[in-house]
Image (cartoon, rainbow, N blue to C red):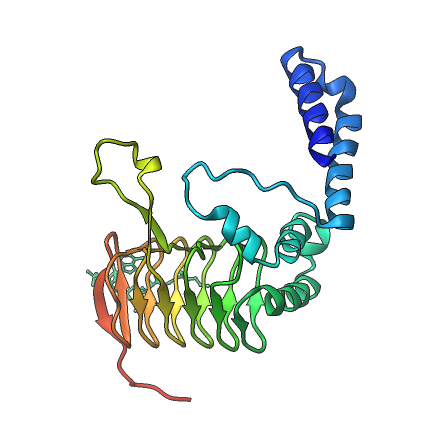
Amino acid sequence: MVEDHHEAFLREFGDLVATGRLPEHGRDLFDRVFAISNDFLATGRVALAADPFRGDDRRLAEDSDLYYVMFWRMFDRTPAAMIQDFAIKVRRILAARVFRSCGEGVVIHHNALFSSGRNIELGDGVFINRDVMLDDRTDISIGSHTMIAAGALIETHGHAYDDVSQPIMHAGRTLAPVAIGPDCLIGFNVAIMSGITVGRRCIVAANSVVTKDVPDHTIVGGVPARKIKEISATKSA
Ligand SMILES: CC(C)(COP(=O)(O)OP(=O)(O)OC[C@H]1O[C@@H](n2cnc3c(N)ncnc32)[C@H](O)[C@@H]1OP(=O)(O)O)[C@@H](O)C(=O)NCCC(=O)NCCS
């Protein structure tokens, strides 16, 4: 049983950390961490944890091509993931498999995080920079040639908070899809809240929190994001 190996590892690891003896056994313990990873790669077996928020994490994982999602995560933790041209092509192949739809020529950098991929639709030429979090509990669509800068967060869930008889953690999730139009720039460290639609050719300024829909051809910025200006057609190539 895989779980028995994990339990034995956890007991020994806990004991070594508590008694300050990890350095004497660190190499061996790390070999066993790799063995657990290799076992997953060879078999696809993974034990899904119970969802502490009583949401649908387990169903999301079961509905996904979990092996491919996990392979992506593991790949991103290897030095090969830093070889940009190679890594982008690897992720393109994985994205075509795990996302609901994925256009031509997408570029996804290091450490994009998502739950299952099943609710994600990317248009052609979408560019996702490093450390972007796509909270794909429900639908996220990103239009063609839209850029998502490093550290951006696209949320599709919140937590109900008005039933004071129970902790917010246990009150259940609220879900609402996010749609981002084509030809947009979502700046670095932006957070887009659940239920938001961003129109076409919009810019969300760096570090903004978007809490309201953004009409086409609009630049918004700030916390919460407000209109900065419209993008007018003054130049063309
Ligand atoms: C929004 C942005 C495009 C504005 O560019 P711009 O057209 O040159 O506009 P300006 O710099 O003249 O700024 C216009 C107004 O927006 C404000 N503003 C600019 N960036 C802002 C931000 N991140 N948050 C809040 N307000 C911002 C300016 O303070 C200015 O306000 P004011 O008119 O009251 O003085 C730019 O600041 C930005 O955030 N770009 C995204 C950068 C990024 O994430 N790059 C990643 C590339 S992958």
Q: Nearer the viewer, residue 218 or 177?
A: 177
Q: Quadrant of the C terminus?
A: bottom left
Q: Quadrant of residue 215?
A: bottom left
What percent of the width, then of the height, locates residue 199? 31, 73
Q: Look at the image and tell me whether residue 115 can be seen.
A: no
Q: Quadrant of residue 139?
A: bottom left
Ligand 1 position by quadrant:
bottom left
Decide if residue 113 is on the left or right side of residue 44: left
Q: Nearer the viewer, residue 118 or 123?
A: 118
Q: Nearer the viewer, residue 230 or 146?
A: 146
Residue at 37% across / 56% down in the picture? 156
Taking the view exactly as shown, the residue that stands out farthest to the bottom is 237
Q: Quadrant of the N terminus?
A: top right
Q: Look at the image and tell me whether residue 41 can be seen.
A: yes
Taking the view exactly as shown, the residue that stands out farthest to the top is 19
Residue at 25% across / 57% down in the picture? 211
What percent of the width, then of the height, locates residue 92? 63, 68
What percent of the width, then of the height, locates residue 222? 26, 55
Residue at 31% across / 39% down in the picture? 171
Q: 100 above or below 50?
A: below
> Count of labels shown?
0
Q: Nearer the viewer, residue 214 or 72?
A: 72
